[in-house]
Image: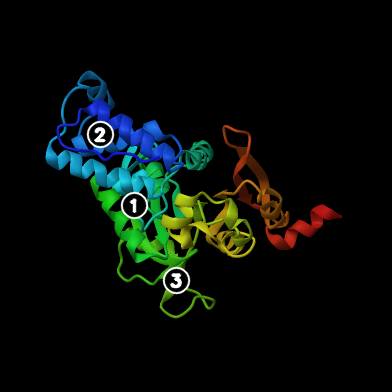
Amino acid sequence: MILGTVNKNMQLKQALTLAIERLEAADVGSSRMNAETLLMFVLGCNRAYLYTYPERELTDDEATRYEKVVALRAADMPSQYITGHQEFWGLDLVVSPAVLIPRPETEHLVETVLELAREVPNPKIVDVGTGSGCVALALANELKGAEVYGVDLSPAALEIAQANAARLQLGSRVRFLRGNVLQVAAVTGSAPWARALGSDDDSPEGFCRFRDLDFVVSNPPYVGLNEADKVQRSVFKFEPRMAVFAGENGLDVIQPLVTEAHDALRAGGWLAVEIGFSLRDAVLDLLSPTMWEAVQVVPDLQGIPRVIATRKNTIPRSDTRALQS
């Protein structure tokens, strides 16, 4: 089937119909929603405008831009990367191919932490693999007294996160640091937030670790290379691989995260991690009962295990043997 192109003087309803047909032909899901989103982006309008003025004609510039963005979406580029925006927890976030696109499922991670944080005054929180900063910023926005940090290995991702913090006027509430899991580049100075960091004999030179945290939170990469064929085309082609894949079985980040989180949390502090649909048992196996307690598995709206939360054992490791006798 040969499909036409969007031209100037084409009415909005005609352009929208054509775009839907092209996206359907390219096997793009939710074709109507995508076509509407891209037309709203080009025109700078809302959805109501599209259907209030269906006979309004496109200008030459609008037609050219709409043709371009529809072609990009037909080639699998996510609409969020085309528009540069994605909403998460009611916050308008800037996104680019440098960061994973925030997803509704990750809001379950935020909900889980907010519920646990109700009994913790002024919690100290670290978001590992912060990406766009969506989780860290959502928590900071809800928990006014919280001390929040976001850690990422990617400098480009940290730039996006810092830009989002500034746009949302949360720049003074969240600190973004470059690091690998919970080891971050050493900082100097006497700023109050720097007291959350300390070095020890196990820290590589030039790096330091977090300490006495109330929460370690993460939406880490958790797709195994053995499941790469199950990933959506748009994710595989455009989203950052380091934010999606984690070794052969998907545990290459979660495994060290569990270990480092135990060292960084205070007794009774919480680890909350988003997981993939097939990782529930593998992640639970990493949680030794001598180190972790009160394990919770939180499902998403489809009943799929989505978040695992667990509390650092409040009894010293050396004392847990007494409970087993």
- The residue where tag 1 is placed is 174
Q: Is residue 41 above or below residue 220?
A: above
Q: Is residue 306 above or below residue 174?
A: above
Mark 3 or 2, nearer chain start = 2
- The residue where tag 3 is placed is 208
- The residue where tag 2 is placed is 40
Pointer 2: residues within 10 angstroms few (<14), some, or many (20+)?
A: some
Q: Nearer the viewer, residue 264 or 134?
A: 134
Tell me if residue 171 can be seen.
Answer: no
Q: Is residue 215 above or below residue 261?
A: above
- For the residues labelled 2 and 1, the Cα–Cα distance comes to 32 Å
- Report x, y in % for residue 264: 53, 61
Colour convention of the picture: rainbow
Three-letter amino acid code at the position of disc 3: Cys
Hey, which quadrant is residue 303 in on the image?
A: top right
- For the residues labelled 3 and 2, the Cα–Cα distance comes to 46 Å
Hey, which quadrant is residue 11 in on the image?
A: top left
Q: Nearer the viewer, residue 325 or 29?
A: 29
Mark 2 or 1, nearer chain start = 2
Three-letter amino acid code at the position of disc 2: Met
Q: Are marks 3 and 1 in contact (CB under 8 Å)?
A: no
In-image side of 101 versus 213 (left or right): left
Quadrant into which the N terminus falls:
top left
Mark 3 or 1, nearer chain start = 1
